[in-house]
Amino acid sequence: MRTPTIAGPPSAAPGTPDALPARQHLPVDAAGRPVLDVVVPVYNEEKDLEPCVRRLHEHLLTTFPYGFRITVADNASTDTTPAVAAALAAELSEVRSVRLEQKGRGRALRTVWSASDAPVLAYMDVDLSTDLNALLPLVAPLISGHSDLAIGSRLARSSRVVRGPKREFVSRAYNLILRSSLAARFSDAQCGFKAIRREVAERLLPMVEDTGWFFDTEMLVLAERAGLRIHEVPVDWVDDPDSTVHIVRTATDDLKGVWRVGRALATGSLPLDRLARPFGDDPRDRELNGVPGGLARQLVGFCVVGVLSTLCYLALYSAFRLGLGPQLANAAALLVSAVANTAANRRLTFGVRGRDRAVRHQAQGLVVFAIGLALTSGSLAALGAATGDPAHSTELAVLVVANLAATVLRFLLFRLWVFPDRASARNER
C-alpha cells in the first residue's frame, strides 16, 4: 500500500508536548496544536465535499472554543474529490487532506487517527446528516476527562430522526443483534458521528481488524468489554437520500464481523487486559476512605470471599456425597472451590488484575489447597475413627470448624506468600 499523501498546513513543531495523562481536562495548547481533529472520510464526493467542509469549518470557528483541524480522508476516489480536498486545504489553514490508495472507512480512520497529534479525534459523514450542534456535546466529555469515547445516537429517546422505514428497520435490527449476540449496551453502533481520546485510540486501534463499515462496531465492542467509558449524545439526524452506502452488502459484512468478534470473545483470544482501565482515575483503583490500612481492607474482602467459597464448598460436598465417599467428596468439592477462591481473592482482595502470573498464583493456591485438604481430611479421619459412622450433619459441622482453621492459614499464606508484592504495596501507601 502506498504511503498516504498529506496536504495542508504543517504538523506541530518537534517541541510540541505529548498528550496529557488521560482522564484530565485538556487545556488550550500554547504551541498551537489543535485540540480536536475531525476526520471526514470521502469516496467520490466531488459535489458534496466543498459545501460540507465549509459548513463544518464555519460552525467550528464560531462555536468551538479550542483549536481544531478538519482532515478530509479520501478513500481512493476516482473523480475530482482529491483536487477539491487539496484546494480546500490550500485555502483554509484549519483543513488538510489525506489521500489513501485503498477504499475503506475504517482504514481511513485508522490511518488519520494514528498519525494525528490532536488529543481528541472525531469523525463525521460527509453528508452532515447529523446536526452540528451535537458536536461540542460529543467531544466535551473527552476534553474534560469524563469519558474515553463518545458516540452520537439516533436511537435515543430524545433524538429526532428523519429517515425511511427500511433504514430505520435495518438500524434497529442491527443494534438488536449486537445486544443479543455481543451483549453490547451502546445504542447506535453505526451512526457516523463519533469521537475518541488519542491515547485511548493508540491502545485500541491496533486491536481492531476491520477496515470497512464494521470498524465502528468492533471498536465500540472492544472498548466496552475493556471497561472504557462510552458517552452517548442524542442527535438530530436527517437521512441523505443520495447516500451511496450499499445496505445489503454492508449488512452482510457487518454480520460477518459480529461472528468474528463474538468467536474471539468466546475463545478469549482478544487481549482485553491490555485495555482494562489502563488510564487510571477509576474508583476501583483507589484506597477506600476510612479503612485503616491495607490489612483491614484485605480482611474484609477475604472474609466475604471466604463465606461465599464455604457455601459453594458445602453445596458441592453435599452433591458429591450422593455418589462418593466422604474423602473423595471432600477433595473434589475443595478443589473446585479452591480454584474459584484463589481467582476471587486475586481479583477482589489483593487487587491483582490481568493475566500476568495468573497461572503461578493458581499453582500456589493449589499448594494452599493441599494444606487445607490435609486439615479437613484429617478432621474427617479423626471423626470416623471416633464415631465409626457419623451422621451427615456431624460431618458438616466438623468440616465447618476445620475450614475455619484452614481459612486463617489460607489468608496468611495468600498475604505473605502468594500475593506479597501487592500486600506490601498497599501497606506502604
Image: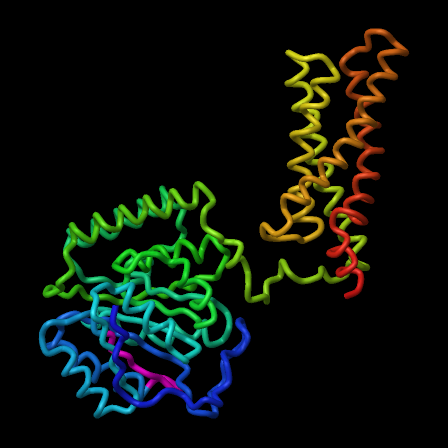
The vertical placement of 330 against 77, above or below, is above
Tell which of 137 and 267 is nearer to you: 267
Q: Is residue 358 above or below residue 235?
A: above
Residue at point 28% right, 58% down? 190
User: Image quarter for residue 103?
Assistant: bottom left
Give the residues drawn in magenta, as a range: 63-73
Please identify the quadrant where the C terminus is shown.
bottom right
Q: State left or right for residue 272 relative to residue 51.
A: right
* Magenta highlight on residue 70: yes
Q: Quadrant of the N terminus?
A: bottom left
Reply above or below: 37 against 14. above
**Residue 171 visible somewhere in the drawing:** yes
Q: Is residue 193 left or right of residue 75?
A: right
Where does the image place residue 54, in percent across and percent down from the top left? 21, 84
Q: Is residue 137 visible?
A: no
Q: Position of residue 150 (x, y in %)?
A: 40, 66
Q: Nearer the viewer, residue 98 or 41?
A: 98
Q: Nearer the viewer, residue 107 or 258?
A: 107
Q: Give the total number of marks visible in the rendering.
A: 0
Residue furthest front as drawn:
2
**Residue 88 image position (x, y, % from top left):** 20, 87
In the rendered image, the residue lying farthest to the top is 388
